[in-house]
Image: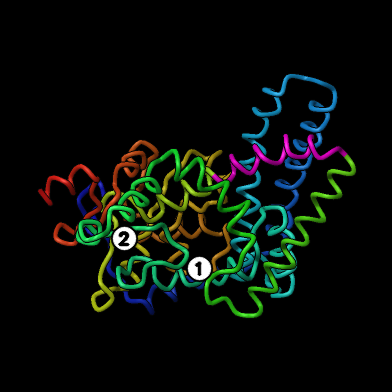
Amino acid sequence: MLTDSGAATPQLTETNWRQALSPYGQPSYRKAIWQLVDTLVPYLALWALMVYLCREGYSYWITLALAVPAGALLIRIFIFFHDCCHGSFFASRRANRILGHLAGILTFTSFDNWRYAHIAHHTTAGSLDRRGMGDIWTLTVEEYAAASWPTRLAYRLFRNPIVLFGVAPAVLFLILQRFSNKNARKRERRSVILTNLGVVAFILAASWAIGWQTYVMIQLPIIVVAGAIGVWLFYVQHQFEGVYWARQDEWDSTKAALEGSSYYKLPQILQWFTGNIGLHHIHHLRPGIPNYNLQRCYDDIPALQAVEPLTIRRSLRSLWLNLWDEKEQALVSFHSARAMLS
């Protein structure tokens, strides 16, 4: 990958990267606890304000407007959940699991089940031969050409931005996360059951306290907003111009991290809400670095700064990149693929 200056991304060995990034993988209880405070307090405050507005008969549009920052805060809570899945938020494994399960109830996501799929994603990202676990459904041009018309239709519908970032997130978090992954082990299946019971208990308690209509009017838009943001972030982390994909016999884990995972450069306030997850190339190099150490890691290591940032404007082009062209080694649009196949 080339930077704006034209300089190639520095090539370091996996061992050298491991040594360089190791100091940043040390969790801090002080930073972790402060993140919980500066996120949960405003999230609960917004929830309380939305309850008040609904029950006092204020315009529902005000509640819907507040669902945007509340959904953004829920994304930040999901980042803590994500760190717990990697065992990096706290130094204690037990503390990570406890917070992970509690945050999983708030985000409607099973801790062990999601962790299972996400770890698989980290070991397969960028490999064309190992797609299908914890990733966005992606076909090559040849696979799309050979597919049946129902498969093509399903793929085109799935890749439609309205479906992918509007319908799919709600379906994912409200319905699909209620079931365990294919080939899930006993721990993952048990985790799904416990999370579902926790979600049901939370819904019943909230419905008793504020009424089920009020609960739905608040929780549903928050989940829809958070889900849309979360799916978009995950999408642009691995679906962008210049992304790296390779067959397994040529796949390189370091290149998959530095060139197959984006550095999504966001304004500071958005970087805060998204828990530094835009520094995704660093996260894939060393998943054990907690979110609160990612920016410091980036600032301290010049080699990481050589990766070309993905800006918000440039990331929007990813909406039209739907298929992987193995000949050109690039993501292409349906229109481009049709021209190549005609």
Alpha carbons under labels 1 and 2: distance apart: 16 Å
Q: Which residues are magenta?
A: 210-227
Q: Is the Cβ of the residue at disc 1 closer than 8 Å to that at disc 2?
A: no
* Image quarter hosting the N terminus: bottom left
**Residue 311 placed where, x, y %?**
37, 41
- Which type of secondary structure does the marked residue at label 1 adopt? loop
Residue at x 73% of width, y 42% of height: 43
Q: Please tell me whether residue 137 belongs to the stretch shown in magenta.
A: no
Tell me the quarter of the picture where residue 320 sits.
top left
Check residue 131 in the rendering and tell me which mark sits there, or answer none.
none
Q: In x, y percent, where is residue 115?
A: 58, 69
Residue type indicated by callout 2: Glu
How packed mark 2 is, by other alpha carbons closer than 10 Å (few <14, some 14-19, many 20 or more), is: many
Most foreground residue, 281 or 325? 325
* Mark closest to the chain's N terminus, 1 or 2: 2
Residue shown at 67% from the left, 40% from the top: 220
Q: Residue at x 38, y 45 (%)?
A: 157
User: Residue 222 versus residue 45: which sits nearer the camera?
Assistant: 222
Residue 261 at x, y percent in the picture? 38, 58
Q: Nearer the viewer, residue 305 or 136?
A: 136
Q: Which residue does the numbered mark 2 point to in the structure image? A: 259
Q: Residue at x 31, y 72 (%)?
A: 129
Q: Secondary structure at mark 2?
A: loop
**In which quadrant of the rendered view does residue 304 lie?**
bottom left
Q: Is residue 288 above or below residue 58?
A: below
Residue 53 vertical placement versus 231 (above, below):
above
Question: Is residue 219 magenta-colored?
Answer: yes
Report the amino acid beneath label 1: Pro
Disc number placed over residue 287 in the picture, else none:
1
